[in-house]
Image (spheres, rainbow, N blue to C red):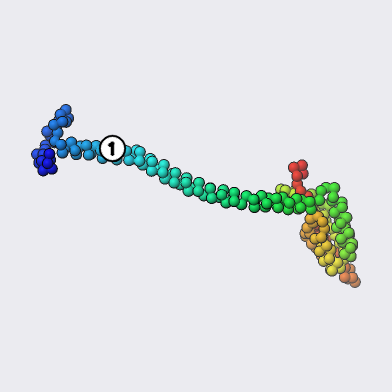
Amino acid sequence: MAFEDVLDSLREFDVNDLEVDNVGSWPIAVKIFIWAALLTMVLVVGYYYHIEGLQLQLLSATEKEGELKEEFETKAFQAANLDAYRAQMVEMKESFGTLVSQLPSDTEVPGLLEDITNKGLLNGLEITSIDLEAEQAKEFYVELPISIIAKGSYHDLGAFVSAMAGLPRIVTLHNFTISAGDANTNQLNMSFIAKTYRYKDGGA
């Protein structure tokens, strides 16, 4: 059938002449139009119910791919530096062990008090009193304050404070109070708190 014949059949076509029971007698142009409309409808429905879902899955997979790439890069970097991390861990453990060894145990406190007293005497101080105060438990360690009152010259006090840094155990000095002694001497009175620490194990 020529194209002109199809156009002529469409011009002469009356929709009222269509009978559902006799589809075979419908004009070829009407059949083509109906089939095209059905195909378009099927494609549209298929897009929204199938292809759109696939696109959403693709979008989700693309985002997941980006996350996995970042995770892979992070793990690859960690794997490449694993030896360095291990060496750093060993170094940290050694440093931690060194610091812990500088914290006195309960049995070493009398020896520490003796060391502090000797440092004072060697630097020309007169230790008036040295008293242990109540322990104070912190998160990872126990703090032991020691109240000290000493007498000596300005230079003697400075030398004593410097000498405290040379103790084999960790001792920190706090709350200094210095006052003048007798009017006829260059002696000064100094009171301060020396704090030492011990590692807080599970039983502390």
Residue 11 visible in rendering? no
Q: Could you say which is closer to the camera, residue 4 or residue 127?
A: 4
State the residue at coordinates (32%, 38%).
46
**Image-based side of 99 in relation to 109, left or right:** left
Q: Is residue 159 above or below residue 99?
A: below
Label 1, residues with CA under 10 Å away: few <14, some 14-19, many ≥20: few
Residue 83 visible in rendering? yes
State the residue at coordinates (52%, 49%).
70
Q: In this view, does 148 lie above or below 153?
A: above
Q: Name, please, the residue furthest toward the top.
A: 21
Quadrant the N terminus occupies: top left
Q: In this view, does 56 lie above or below 154?
A: above
Judging by the rendered image, the residue that carries numbered circle 1 is: 42
**Image-based side of 119 in relation to 25, left or right:** right
Secondary structure under badge 1? helix
**Image-based side of 132 in relation to 31, left or right:** right
Residue 96 coordinates in the image, percent (x, y): 73, 51
State the residue at coordinates (25%, 38%).
39
Q: Name, please, the residue furthest toward the bottom.
A: 184
Number of marks drawn: 1
Residue 197 coordinates in the image, percent (x, y): 78, 52
Q: In which quarter of the image is residue 173?
A: bottom right
Residue 50 coordinates in the image, percent (x, y): 35, 38
Q: Mark 1 is on which residue type?
A: Val
State the residue at coordinates (82%, 56%).
168
Q: Could you say which is closer to the camera, residue 64 or residue 121?
A: 64
Quadrant the C terminus occupies: top right
Q: Is residue 157 above or below residue 168?
A: below
Residue 136 coordinates in the image, percent (x, y): 76, 49
Q: Could you say which is closer to the camera, residue 38 or residue 182?
A: 38
